[in-house]
């Protein structure tokens, strides 16, 4: 593949639902969640570099963590913004001109796999824009406060996850239009959709959770135990 594949990880959130602690720096089995996430992209051979969006007051702590982790891939830091959209755009502006694909991933989704990252990159290479997502298994109701207005066919619904992978020029165009029109998207794919461009999807996993609440942290501990056991079995084989 010509040009670089660079992962952007917005890690500037305040973690309000976790109380006073910033969720990306909270520890899971003694290691910050952000580091667990970075390790997944370190292991993915298709990813060349990583760019983190970090608030100014956290940069020293993040640099210290990166120094301890000794990742082999280049990691750069861009200033975090007030919104996720601002943080991702700050990273985009910091990427080198030979960037081909941009992989955007939540800092607090540490259970993504190299295989899923690779699948999204391969699909985005073909289509230009791809997200990871899972099918909706619950019945979804459209409501007005406490009154049910109708049932939405779940076979037409997907729960969007990250990573979300885009051609660099396409994502730059999407952010430019959003800025000009003061449009705020719920994720990067929504900005590309706002351009009128097609976004494709590859299967994700229910394990690929976004850790945002104390209950999520408990579930993450269970998933990490499973992951470690699976890794040990694979090593024994």
Image (cartoon, helix red, strand yellow):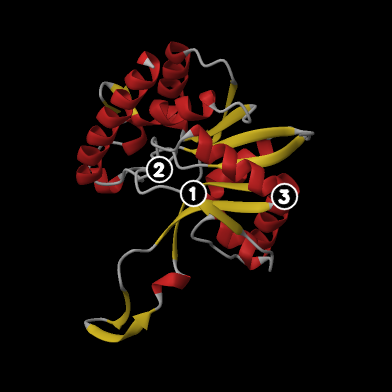
Q: CA distance from mark 1 to mark 2?
A: 8 Å
Residue marked by disc 3: 126
Q: Residue at x 72, y 49 (%)?
A: 126
What is the secondary structure assignment of the residue under circle 3?
A: helix
Mark before the other along the chain sequence, 2 or 3 = 2
Instruction: Please indicate, yes or no, whether residue 63 appears anywhere in the rendered image.
Output: yes
What is the secondary structure assignment of the residue under circle 2?
A: loop
Residue marked by disc 1: 84
**Residue 235 or 54: which is nearer the viewer?**
235
In front of the other: label 2 or label 3? 3
Say if 144 sits above or below 96 in the image: below
Residue 174 sits in quarter: bottom right
- Where is residue 25 shown, x and y percent of the image? 34, 30
Q: CA distance from mark 1 to mark 3?
A: 27 Å
Q: Residue at x 35, y 49 (%)?
A: 206
Residue marked by disc 2: 13
């Amino acid at each position: 593949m010509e040009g670089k594949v660079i992962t952007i990880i917005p890690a500037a959130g305040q973690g309000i639902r976790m109380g006073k602690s910033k969720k990306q720096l909270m520890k899971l089995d003694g290691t910050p969640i952000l580091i667990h996430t970075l390790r997944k992209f370190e292991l993915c051979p298709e990813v060349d570099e990583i760019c983190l969006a970090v608030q100014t007051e956290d940069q020293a702590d993040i640099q210290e963590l990166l120094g301890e982790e000794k990742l082999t891939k280049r990691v750069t830091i861009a200033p975090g913004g007030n919104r996720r959209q601002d943080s991702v755009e700050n990273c985009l502006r910091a990427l080198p001109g030979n960037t081909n694909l941009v992989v955007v991933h939540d800092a607090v989704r540490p259970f993504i796999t190299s295989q899923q990252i690779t699948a999204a990159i391969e699909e985005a290479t073909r289509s230009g824009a791809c997200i990871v997502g899972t099918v909706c298994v619950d019945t979804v109701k459209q409501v007005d406060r406490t009154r049910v207005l109708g049932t939405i066919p779940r076979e037409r619904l997907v729960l969007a996850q990250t990573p979300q992978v885009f051609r660099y020029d396409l994502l730059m165009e999407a952010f430019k239009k959003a800025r000009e029109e003061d449009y705020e998207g719920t994720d990067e794919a929504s900005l590309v959709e706002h351009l009128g461009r097609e976004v494709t999807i590859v299967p994700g996993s229910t394990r690929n959770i976004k850790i945002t609440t104390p209950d999520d942290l408990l579930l993450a501990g269970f998933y990490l135990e499973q992951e470690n056991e699976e890794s040990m079995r694979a090593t024994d084989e």
